[in-house]
Image (spheres, rainbow, N blue to C red):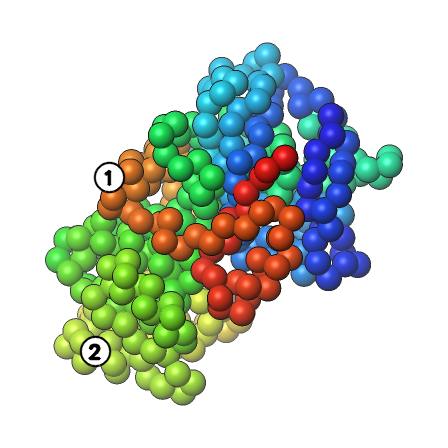
Amino acid sequence: MKVRAAVAYQSQPSFLIEELEMSDPGPENILVRLVGCGLCHTDVKAREDTMGVPMPAVLGHEGAGIVESVGERVTKVKPGDHVVLTGDSCGACPTCLAGNPAYCDLMTPLNLTDGRAGEPGSFHKGGVAIHGHFFGQSSFANYAVTRERNTIPVRKDAPLEILGVLGCGVQTGAGAIMNSLHPPAGSSIAIFGAGPVGLSAVMGAVVCGCSVIIAVDVLESRLAMARQLGATHTVLARRQAKTADEIQQIVPGGVGYAFDTTGRADSNQQALESLAAKGCFGFCAVPAEAPKMSRVMIRGLSIRGIVQGDSVPDSFIPRLVELHMDGRFPFDKLVAKYPFEKINQAIGDQAAGNVVKPVFTFAF
Ligand SMILES: [Zn+2]
Ligand SMILES: [Zn+2]
């Protein structure tokens, strides 16, 4: 069958919308008609430096859509079901079996490097393989081929067009707070970086009942959004400024929890210095250099690296949908919708700080 996709070529500075041929999805897979797909930083990074993804490739890993058809061995979903797509995991390695699919031993091949050229449901154009199955989905296309492992059924009265963002960026931020750090009600937390992941963390901290939620960012517009989503305080980060001192003024002695989404060494350092004794620091992006460790020992701090918010997608994504439908998780406020054809414009708008989280909608 034919699909319309945004193809990343290493030689091209932007995505090209092209018509591709897709082979039969096969007995193990699910064919999903995309309704919406979020843009995540990893899509942009993979196009710029491949991250090991074989090129050319169809990227996109925050898809949501409707099951079109299923292979004969698929039992989890049926045609017509509404589904959110998320990263793939094997389900059989010791890490998956222990309930930690975000750290699957096959994470890199399944989500990035495999490409799965020639396998069921793969793309080609004029006989040339176009790699797919990025994060088990390649959802910058009007159809995606997925597996039961990374296809999550959701209730049909939820706004399907925007639900795809729950499958990566939003679960990464909200999950880091709700699953990984799980601060108790009444505790204090500082969240560094108020992009889509940091703002999702703010909403997660609200769900957890934190009484002090401090958002830190370099953009006042994003801090305003953080306040709208439940941050009790905001700190404008400036070059050379000690944001930790401002946080210590808000919470004398320091906050109990800090979460960094920026991947910047200076931000990591300020996060550690903003913590009270025995505080816990979580991070979901790797800085070029490690922060100084002396304070970690002297103040008895803990450090947690966190992937995908420790999400078990089959339970966590429907939980986020429930919270949203109850009005307790307003992630729709982050979203700016674009027709799929405007993908390159959306990337520019996000880079310029004009929008927080682009979501592409499919009209064909
Ligand atoms: Zn992502
Ligand atoms: Zn695994």
> Residue furthest toward the right?
127
Give the class, few, some or many, for how many residues have Cα within 10 Å of label 2's Cα (few <14, many ≥20). some
Q: What's the residue type where badge 1 is placed?
A: Asp
Residue 355: percent from left, percent from top: 47, 62
* Cα distance in 3D space between marks 1 and 2: 34 Å
Name the front one of labels 1 and 2. Answer: 1
**Relative to 151, 188 lies left or right:** left
> In front: 260, or 36?
36
* Residue 348 appears in the picture as rendered: yes
Quarter occupied by residue 266: bottom left
Looking at mark 1, is its residue's CB closer than 8 Å to ligand 1? no
Q: What's the residue type where badge 2 is placed?
A: Gln
**Relative to 346, 255 lies left or right:** left
For the N terminus, give its image quadrant: top right
> In front: 124, or 324?
324
Give the class, few, some or many, for how many residues have Cα within 10 Å of label 1's Cα (few <14, many ≥20). few
The residue sitting at 14% across, 77% down in the picture is: 252
> In front: 260, or 98?
260
The residue sitting at 54% across, 50% down in the picture is: 338
Pointer 1 residue: 326
* Residue 172 appears in the picture as rendered: no
Residue 195: percent from left, percent from top: 42, 62
**Relative to 310, 244 lies left or right:** left
Residue 24: percent from left, percent from top: 71, 22
Pointer 2 residue: 248
Q: Earlier in the sequence, mark 1 or mark 2?
A: 2
> Where 210 falls versus 35 (above or below)?
below
The residue sitting at 34% across, 78% down in the picture is: 236
